[in-house]
Image (tube, coloured by chain):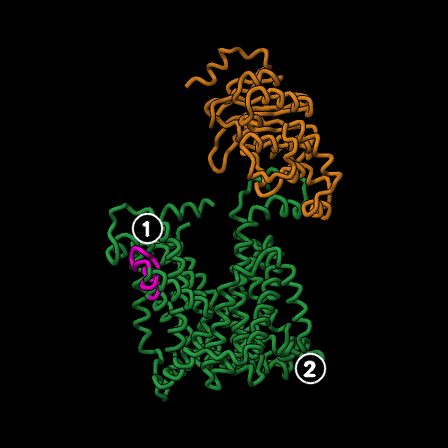
Amino acid sequence: MLNFSGEALSYGRTTVLSDVDFTLRPGERVVLLGRSGAGKSTLLNAAYARMAESFPDIALIPQEHGLVPQLSVFHNVYMGRLDAHGAAYNLANLVWPFRAERRAIAPVLETVGLDGFARATVETLSGGQKQRTALARAIHRGGRVLIGDEPVSAVDERHAAALIDELGRRFGTILLALHDVALARRIATRLVGIRAGRIFFDRPTADVSDGDIHDLYRA
Amino acid sequence: MTSTVPERRRRLGRVGTALVFVVLAAMLLPFADFRLGGHDPWAELQRMASGLLSPDFSSIEALGWAAVLTVTFAMCGVALGASAGFALAPFYRFVPVRNFCIAVRSIHELFWAILLMQITGLSATTGILAIAIPYAGIFAKVLAEYLDEGDPRPAAAMPPRADLISVHFFARLPLARREFRTYLLYRLECGLRSSAVLGFVGLPTLGFSLDTFFKQGMYGAVAAVLIIYYVLIGTMRLWMRRPLVPVYLTAAILVMAAMPNPPMAPGALARFLTHDILPAPLRSGDPGDPGTWAHFGDWLWTLLAGQALPGLAATLIVAQLALVLAGLVALLGFPLTVPPVAGRLGAALGHVALVIARSTPEYMLAYIALQIFGPSMLPAVLALGLHNGAIIAHLLGRQSAHLHQNLRPDASRGIVLYAYELLPRIYGSFLALCLYRWEIIVRESAIIGLLGIPTLGFYVDRAIQEIRIDRAVVLLIVTMLATVAIDWLSRKTRAAIAPKDLRQGAAAA
């Protein structure tokens, strides 16, 4: 699905990751680990940009969510499927939400724990609720592949695990960045450690020892 | 990107930049025509003052209707201009669209009005389009800027194949909605000013009543017009409520539709486009004949050397002097609105003075000054300097409101506070605002020629009265180029004097 071999990836004009060899195959659930600023987001962004061309049914949960604060939760979730309809339908639904769309989105909101928040504008929500909105948008979008940058960082531990499991059920192929190692082990079939601008390890989850993790986060 | 001009300007510094303008104005002063009219201004002034102090509302019905029409023209014009600008904004980054917007907004509403009058006569269409056309260019630019400043991340998070229109309306427009709404209200206030001024070229708004009463020496009635106008502007934020907008707009359209249309010859538009605006030598001559083009060359040269050049020179003299005067008015007027400097009562009075000076259209101020001082550059410079200076002072006052609240508790008061604490802090914004108004002042200097001062507007007006539209168009193009050139120069200078961190921020964005 995705293949980087020996590539340099940059954030803006600065090269963050060099000599990247990375492959994502259908059905894999890969989690990127590493200290903040190691280049996880850079790898995710590059992966999204590359895959969006050949797999338009890709869902994305970006860092900082990319929500429109002035619009309602309903509209922000609806935007996950903005490509499913023509502009006229979308604009009409923006002005006057269709009942069919409301009904389609209600169960998704229930899944992420935003029951009854459909009409609330995103700017009035708490950080955790905003993140749940971004999750709902990705779930509503659906598709074969999900790319998520710390998708549950603002949600409490218990809910985070449930939401991650939900994502695992909904998407066949997953590429995430997480800072919670336990959560990463819970979902990933493969763990990729990034350290000092390079891929430090890239192994099936069972083959990554606590020592490897310790070395990855070592100062 | 570094060019030599900003490098030199940077060495010039902020005080140096201001000095360049002051010295330039001093050098232009001997060329400025500041003669007082042949009559004794003080006698006239006395009559005016006594009239203004006893407003005469006897023709309140006619004035009320003129006020309604002023609001109506403004609403229809602004609504149409905003809609067009709204549609153009997403495409503003394309050079042809941007140039089109620059061109239409560099021509003043009054010029549009006298040009459109050749096609649609003294009608509702003329008034609405005269406001809508330049405003469309302004709205497009401002909305495009708001959209660019908006957070790009929501749009980046949209599905890869979502269509551009949906992404624009869902992920870009909502981010600029609040700013745009505030700006729309501000523009409506400008629209009221523009609409009132359209009366001076014959449309039935408050400017027309003002002109009529002035010419008859009925200064009491003049005072009534001005009071109605100030009340209209001053209370706008009270009656302009969002839920009422559809009601107002419908009413405005109905009023406009009921306005009588003057009988225009059929095909006026076609005639205007294919005949009137064609240069006279090309109109009659054979385009294959080289003699025609020689004729055209002579025609153009005579026009440029005999009218455009002197008109441009006068425009720039008025503009440069008015710019320096505006700077002075701002520097003197702004502290008068700051309570720790002027005292509580002084600040209140200062506010009132600034509100009057900035909400009276510059054209109206010039008109009144002209009645007092007679036709020379003096009323033009005074009007433009006062009006623009008051606007700059108002904006500075708003900025420094935060400033003096955050001053240390033992800060001094009065003039010392102004000189040591406020002025150094706001000087950068002061200069940037002056440079920003520069282009506007040039455009206004050109238009003030309609009052008989020999700037570009004077020659445009004369050409139109002689029904030589072809000449008027050439002169308007010269006006447009001058405005665009000053705009460019102003942007360069502003970039050069901006603080270094700000400049880098702008480059990064």
Say which amino acid is labelled 1: His
Under circle 1, the secondary element is helix
Toward which corner of the image does residue A196 lie, by quadrant?
Answer: top left
Please state which of the two labelled residues, at mark 2 or mark 1, is closer to the viewer: 1
- Labels 2 and 1 positioned on one and the same chain: yes
Using the image as rendered, state which of residue B496 and residue B39 is in the foreground: B39
Q: Badge 1 is on which residue? A: B404
Q: Indicate whether B57 appears above or below A132.
A: below
Mark positioned earlier in the residue sequence (2 or 1): 2
The picture's colour for chain B is: green
Pointer 1 indicates a residue of which chain?
B
- Disc 2, disc 1: CB below 8 Å? no
- The magenta region covers B329-344
Under circle 2, the secondary element is loop
Q: Which chain is orange?
A: A
Using the image as rendered, state which of residue A162 and residue B454 is in the foreground: A162
